[in-house]
């Protein structure tokens, strides 16, 4: 009887460790897929597959441009709205949303205390690919109108404040 209990306990412990290892491997695979998807999005932004020109590039010259190409989910973006509200200044940040969502963005601006001064509307940013439908991204538009430093914002571990500081420290527009 004791041998049977010991064998059962060993079997249970073995199964428990097997499940833990399996969870770790699945977690690593998920992180790898997220990283690949993130790299794909950034490459498509940089290559121009994902459009990031509204009408006149100079319209955003000298600004950080936050784009919600297909929609805004306040629940999904609470982490992003929190980071925007904690920025020391949002005077160099403009937001672009589809025409139908301008009112929503104005409401979120008030509710989440985002302090956004400029909200632009455009349908030119719309992305038809299903895998990018909830994507949000940011870039810096240089004073010459060049799109620089695109960054996809779909990870909660992205520090928006750090992004602003890094861009300002490496771009000649801020020197």
Image (cartoon, rainbow, N blue to C red):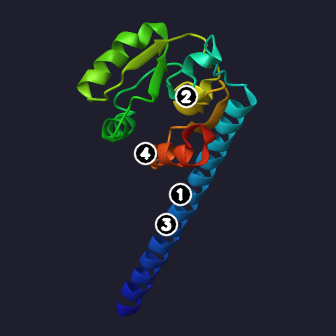
Relative to residue 6, is residue 135 drawn left or right? right
- Which corner quadrant of the image does residue 108 belong to? top left
Label located before the other in sequence (1 or 3): 3
Q: Secondary structure at mark 1?
A: helix
Relative to residue 172, is residue 100 drawn left or right? left
Q: Residue 19 — which label?
A: 3
User: Mark 4 or 2, which is nearer the eye?
Assistant: 2
Label located before the other in sequence (1 or 2): 1
Label located before the other in sequence (4 or 2): 2
Q: Label 1 neighbourhood size at 10 Å, few (<14), some (14-19), many (20+)?
A: few
Q: Residue 161 — which label?
A: 4
What x and y, as percent, mark residue 99? 47, 7
CA distance separating discs 1 and 3: 12 Å
Q: Secondary structure at mark 4?
A: helix
User: Mark 1 or 3, which is nearer the eye?
Assistant: 1
Residue under numbered circle 1: 27
Q: Give the residue at the far right of this rendering.
A: 47
Residue at x-position 61% and y-position 42%: 171
Q: Residue 62 — which label?
A: 2
Q: Which of the two residues, 35 or 3, is positioned nearer the viewer here?
A: 35
Q: Which of the two residues, 25 or 78, is positioned nearer the viewer here?
A: 78
CA distance separating discs 1 and 2: 40 Å
Q: Label 2 neighbourhood size at 10 Å, few (<14), some (14-19), many (20+)?
A: some
Q: Is residue 16 above or below residue 86?
A: below
Residue at x-position 31% and y-position 27%: 115
Tell me the quarter of the image containing the N terminus: bottom left
Pointer 1 with pointer 3, Cβ within 8 A: no
Residue at x-position 61% and y-position 27%: 143
Q: Is residue 8 above or below residue 88?
A: below
CA distance separating discs 4 and 1: 28 Å
Q: Secondary structure at mark 3?
A: helix
């Amino acid at each position: 009887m004791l041998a049977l209990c010991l064998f059962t306990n060993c079997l249970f412990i073995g199964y428990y460790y097997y499940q833990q290892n399996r969870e770790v491997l699945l977690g690593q695979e998920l992180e790898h897929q997220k990283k690949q998807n993130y790299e794909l999005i950034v490459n498509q932004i940089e290559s121009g597959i994902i459009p990031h020109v509204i009408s006149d590039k100079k319209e955003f010259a000298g600004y950080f441009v936050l784009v919600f190409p297909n929609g805004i989910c306040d629940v999904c973006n609470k982490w992003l709205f929190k980071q925007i509200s904690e920025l020391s200044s949002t005077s160099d940040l403009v937001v672009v949303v589809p025409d139908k969502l301008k009112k929503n963005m104005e409401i979120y601006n008030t509710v989440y205390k985002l302090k956004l001064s400029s909200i632009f509307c455009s349908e030119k940013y719309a992305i038809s690919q299903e895998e990018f439908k909830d994507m949000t991204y940011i870039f810096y538009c240089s004073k010459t109108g060049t799109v620089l430093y695109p960054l996809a914002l779909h990870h909660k571990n992205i520090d928006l404040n750090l992004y602003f500081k890094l861009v300002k420290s490496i771009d000649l527009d801020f020197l």
